[in-house]
Amino acid sequence: MALTTSQFVREFEDNALALFADELDQLSPQQQYQALAVTVKRYYAKQWADTKDRYDRTQEKQVYYFSIEFLPGRLLASNLLNLGIKDTVEKGLRKLGLDPAVIYAQEADPGLGNGGLGRLAAAFMDSMASVGMAGNGNGIRYQYGLFQQRFVDGYQVELPDDWLRDPDMWETRKENRAVIVKYGGQVALRPRQNGSLQAIYHDTDDVLAVPYDTPMVGYQTGVVNTMRLWSAETVPGRVHDLAEKARINAITQILYPDDSDSAGRELRLRQEYFFVSAGIQSIVTHFKRFHRDLSVLPHFVAIHINDTHPAMAVLELMRILLDEEEMSWEQAWQVTVATMSYTNHTLMAEALESWPQAMFASLLPRLFQIAQEIDRRFRLTYVRRYGELIVNQAAPLADGQLRMAFLAVIGSHAVNGVAKLHSELLKQSVLKALYQIFPERFTNETNGITQRRWVQIADPALATLIDTKIGPGWRRNPLALTRLREFEDDEQFLTDLIAAKQQNKLKLADLIQRQLGLTVAPASLFDVQIKRLHAYKRQLLHVFGILEAYLALKNGEDRPPRVHVFGAKAAPSYRYAKAVIKLINAVADLVNHDPAVNTKLKVAFLPNYGVSLGEQIIPAADISEQISLAGTEASGTSNMKLMATGAITLATLDGANIEIRDAAGKDSMAVFGLTAAQVEAAQRDHTYSARALYDQDPLIHRIVDMLTDGTIPGVATEGREIQDELLEYNDNYFVLADFRSYLAASRRLDQLSQTPLAWARLALANIAASGQFAADFTVARYGREIWQVLPSQPADE
Ligand code: GLS
């Protein structure tokens, strides 16, 4: 959009005055932020209204992305960038004597997700608007996001994430679009005249679902899509006692702080039904304003089930089509399957949700009847062809449980994993039986990231440098980054790349100093691992690498200096993960205070990792640790963000690491460890013995002993627990098995760092190859292959 600096300054001042009845310089930074946000809101409001109006007029197919998590990050800078007015606004702010960075930092980072899954959902929203697809988010407006993490004496302490304490400046409450969600009660079925059954509900608990809409501003497309988050309230005019009110408020009060762990609690089930039912009801209501015949729904609407949490969308759409629209079962089923699609995001058994049938039936009696009928028809249809065994393995109801992933596959026309390896493993393991029955439904859609946030906003030094070589075209079409390959022998450019990275490292060093009181040398290698804390991600392997370096340095060996940067939250109930947090902090204490090593080795564990902290860490990384046990990380996305800003990946052949290596070239990644097939074989044949490695390898012996022999102060309990996991429970994630090979790969990086130009060349290869991992391309593929919607602004892939 066209905006001059002076126009912006005038409008900003006006808005500040109107909001706070004061001049700008009298306002707190938070008030200045609010006035600025209001100003920006005015710049996109018309585009937002126009986009909605256009969708209504043209009836272009709408994608509804159902996700229990969204992690959009701060939106101010992103909205400015996408509107094309970031430079103008920043110039205006400076003219007024204001620091844009200080104002940006006023915005709360919406913590409405745990990790990669929620961040991916938010990236998809940004990308759909940016490629001109009609994408709508549907989720929960949690009053409290994921906890704020502090460290006290090295232990994780969880504080409430009261992200709505200052108002969310972007959301708009849409009272006029509220719907009622019903729980519990009884259902009676009565035959209708046309032979179908009418469901009559008694004694239900009713909750009002009020939507809050947040704009998803496309990157200079004029498209502004909507992310709709639902909040639970009491139904006006009904009498509720206090306990009932509290029960209703609880539905959208907190985000479950679990990632790969299914919380398995009734409240979670209520949450899931809440946003699913509200979302489907509002889709159908909106659709009926324009169409009489619901059988054409799949031509105009695609509903995406992001992981199993919204899988009951299948049941809810069936309920509405059967009970409210009086469709026959056959027709309702055909419409539902054609409308739904499903992404699986993990192989972790504990994350594949299933609900005790009794619990499900009492909270959602009508949905349970529908699930039973789906199960009955599924068995009937396929048992003759596939046999009892396979049908039992694949059916939604078994062993007293309702298995949501299976329901999602049966009720969808397309199912995908999130990286090539993951999509293959799905077919061979958890969804094997269903793959035999519905092979044509299975596809792969490798995850993606938004270079807008991670490069353009978070790494302006790199972004401007790239512009000087290939022009700004990559900002719209990240594939243009491949042209950077032409400069791999341009020493001046490589030197400039190093300088840009150095500038980012200085900034991170400053943050580490401020947050931890720890001085780190920006000339060191910054070795970064940022992700949820989970045994399979193997932060422990990284710690063992640090301990090996510690021993070597103590022994007088010389090593290039390294700073190990961690960011990770552990689920509050996940004991092992919390033990590893304590261990990392204790190792940090040990090495950071030991003058014999601390000029060469530092450990910085920054608390409260999230999108905003990621924006500060990622551009400063030299090494990206992607070291999960092969076959366990579905895709990973920090691997893509870190490569895009020129870190070199230290990785197992897991998740999307494999595709990153294929894209950037074999030598551009330091690969180590067992392959997924090797791990599978070792598990199947029981050939792995951690104890044997401990007994045979003196270095492993020494390091495992360090957990309990007092070398690392303060970890008597945690060290013992971790040691037991390794030796008594045979090291479920093969940390010891991969340790030697991890070390060797890490030492290769030490070697490489001795030749800065060679290092920079590999960094460049990674940056140049990162374009294909743009979420813009990922959503375009989903559009083509799954949702049958085309981007209106195709970037040339
Ligand atoms: C996850 C996977 O663990 C990640 O590997 C993946 O990148 C992400 C997005 O697809 O989804 N699954 C999950 O439950 N949490 C994740 O972050």
Image (tube, rainbow, N blue to C red):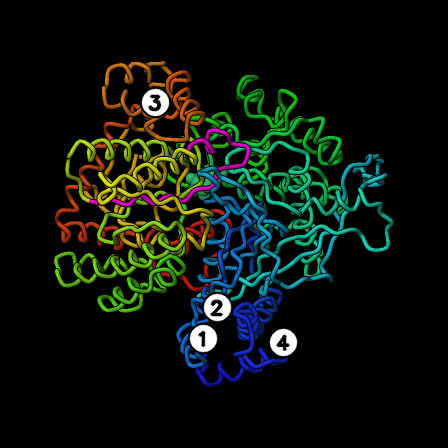
Start and end of the magenta stretch? 561-580
| Residue 660 falls left or right of residue 749 | right
* Residue that badge 2 annotates: 103
Is label 4's Cβ within 8 Å of ligand 1?
A: no
Say what secondary structure mark 3 lies in.
Answer: loop
What residue is shown at x 52% (from left), y 69% (from top)? 29
Q: Which residue is mark 3?
A: 709
Q: Residues within 10 Å of mark 1 (few under 14, many from 20)?
A: some
Q: Residue tagged by mark 1?
A: 98
Examine the rendering and report whether any part of residue 204 can be seen.
yes
At 75% from the left and 33% from the top, the residue drawn is: 365
In the depicted structure, whether residue 759 falls above or below residue 435? below
Question: What residue appears at the point 59 percent right and 44 percent down from the top-left corner?
Answer: 255
In terms of secondary structure, where does tag 4 sit?
helix
Q: Amino acid at mark 3?
A: Asp
- Given contact means CB atoms under 8 Å apart, are the residues at marks 2 and 1 in contact? yes
Q: Which residue is mark 4?
A: 19
Is residue 339 left or right of 8 when viewed as pictured? right
**CB of mark 4 within 8 Å of CB of mark 2?**
no
Q: Is residue 659 visible?
A: no
Q: Quadrant of residue 683?
A: top left
Regarding mark 1 in the picture, which secondary structure is present there? loop
Quadrant assignment for ligand 1: top left
User: Within 10 Å of the Cα at label 2, are there few (<14), some (14-19), or many (20+) other Cα atoms?
Assistant: many
* Amino acid of disc 2: Ile
Q: The C terminus is located in which quarter?
A: bottom left
Tell me the kind of residue under disc 1: Leu
